[in-house]
């Protein structure tokens, strides 16, 4: 018996317009979730929602995770519209920018942390009350090997935020465990995404391609590799896993 689209469990993905967020949103749509596609990239986010709606169910919401009122409004609207709490949250939204210590301004540091770290707190804070009442849920936070495992030259704010996400994930997992909400993180390695392909603020295509030789599995990861790991972490097969950071890097950090 088919499940009505009205009764599908809700999964919210931040930064779902491109890259890992897009791959995750599309995957969750195939898994039978109503996907709440959120991003500041409206054109891209709406396109992802349309793709999901061809065979599944999705809604697009403009959401800036650095804006508390915007985050609270989106979560409240979704809960009211579907008369139930979110069941899954994928905290993916993030930014990276080359910022060497020399010349770094306080506002530069704060900008990265407002999005990459504090943004995750805002989403979880808004959704947690009703998730706790439901006694069910799964949250996945996207960290990075940069900060969690290794440093990244000229990316101190980003690395610090990503390390902070690991601490946030572990602490939140302990706090929400009694309410049957699991919280885990993923630390991706080198992944083919728009962020990694940026030659100014990241590696760029030539350097990224060359870096594959240093990865034990001899390839750069894909957004789908991360989406598949997320799918496992939110599934019942991972029901005894919480407070963990899963490194998905083709063996890179293990070889360092």
Image (tube, rainbow, N blue to C red):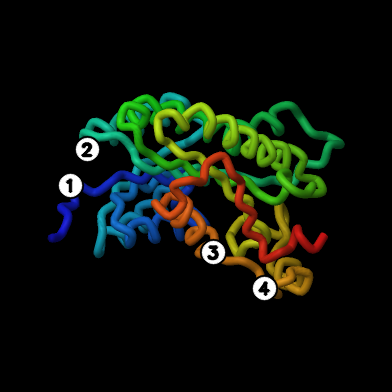
Q: Residues within 10 Å of mark 4 (few under 14, many from 20)?
A: some
Precedes in sequence: disc 3 or disc 1: 1
- Distance from disc 3 to disc 2, alpha carbons, whole Å, reads 30 Å
Is 183 above or below relative to 2? above
- Distance from disc 1 to disc 2, alpha carbons, whole Å, reads 7 Å
Asked which secondary structure carries label 3, the reply is helix
- Name the one closer to the observer, 232 or 228: 232
Residue 33, percent across and down?
A: 30, 52
Residue 40, percent across and down?
A: 46, 43
- Distance from disc 4 to disc 2, alpha carbons, whole Å, reads 42 Å
Q: Which residue is mark 3?
A: 225
Is 54 above or below relative to 200? below
Kindly indicate whether the residue at mark 2 contacts the one at mark 1 (C-beta within 8 angstroms): yes
Kindly indicate whether the residue at mark 1 contacts the one at mark 3 (C-beta within 8 angstroms): no
Kindly indicate whether the residue at mark 2 contacts the one at mark 4 (C-beta within 8 angstroms): no
* Residue 70 can be seen, yes or no: no
Looking at the image, residue 255 sits to the left or right of residue 166; the answer is right
Checking the image for residue 219, the label placed there is: 4
* Residue 57 can be seen, yes or no: yes
Kindly indicate whether the residue at mark 2 contacts the one at mark 3 (C-beta within 8 angstroms): no
Precedes in sequence: disc 4 or disc 2: 2
Q: Where on the picture, by quarter, is residue 211?
A: bottom right
Precedes in sequence: disc 1 or disc 2: 1
Quarter of the N terminus within the rendering: bottom left
Is 245 above or below relative to 197? above
Tell me what residue is drawn at x 61 percent, y 46 percent.
Answer: 245
Q: Residues within 10 Å of mark 3 (few under 14, many from 20)?
A: some
Q: Which residue is mark 2?
A: 82
Q: Which residue is mark 1?
A: 6
- Distance from disc 1 to disc 4, alpha carbons, whole Å, reads 41 Å
Looking at the image, residue 142 sits to the left or right of residue 217; the answer is left
Checking the image for residue 76, the label placed there is: none
């Amino acid at each position: 018996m088919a499940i009505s689209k009205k009764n599908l469990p809700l999964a919210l993905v931040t930064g779902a317009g491109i890259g890992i967020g897009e791959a995750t949103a599309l995957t969750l749509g195939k898994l039978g979730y109503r996907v709440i596609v959120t991003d500041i990239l409206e054109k891209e986010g709406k396109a992802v929602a349309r793709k999901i709606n061809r065979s599944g169910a999705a809604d697009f919401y403009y959401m800036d995770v650095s804006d508390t009122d915007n985050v609270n409004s989106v979560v409240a609207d979704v809960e009211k519209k579907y008369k139930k709490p979110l069941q899954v949250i994928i905290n993916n939204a993030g930014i990276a920018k080359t910022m060497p210590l020399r010349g770094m301004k306080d506002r530069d540091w704060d900008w990265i942390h407002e999005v990459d770290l504090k943004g995750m707190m805002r989403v979880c804070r808004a959704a947690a009350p009703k998730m706790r009442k439901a006694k069910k849920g799964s949250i996945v936070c996207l960290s990075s090997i940069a900060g969690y495992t290794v440093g990244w030259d000229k990316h101190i704010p980003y690395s610090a935020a990503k390390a902070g996400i690991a601490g946030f994930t572990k602490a939140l997992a302990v706090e929400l465990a009694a309410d049957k909400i699991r919280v885990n993180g993923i630390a991706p390695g080198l992944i083919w995404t728009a962020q990694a392909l940026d030659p100014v603020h990241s590696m760029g295509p030539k350097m990224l391609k060359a870096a594959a030789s240093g990865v034990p599995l001899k390839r750069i990861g894909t957004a789908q590799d991360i989406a598949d790991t997320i799918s496992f972490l939110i599934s019942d097969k991972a029901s005894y896993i919480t407070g963990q950071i899963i490194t998905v890097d083709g063996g890179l950090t293990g070889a360092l």
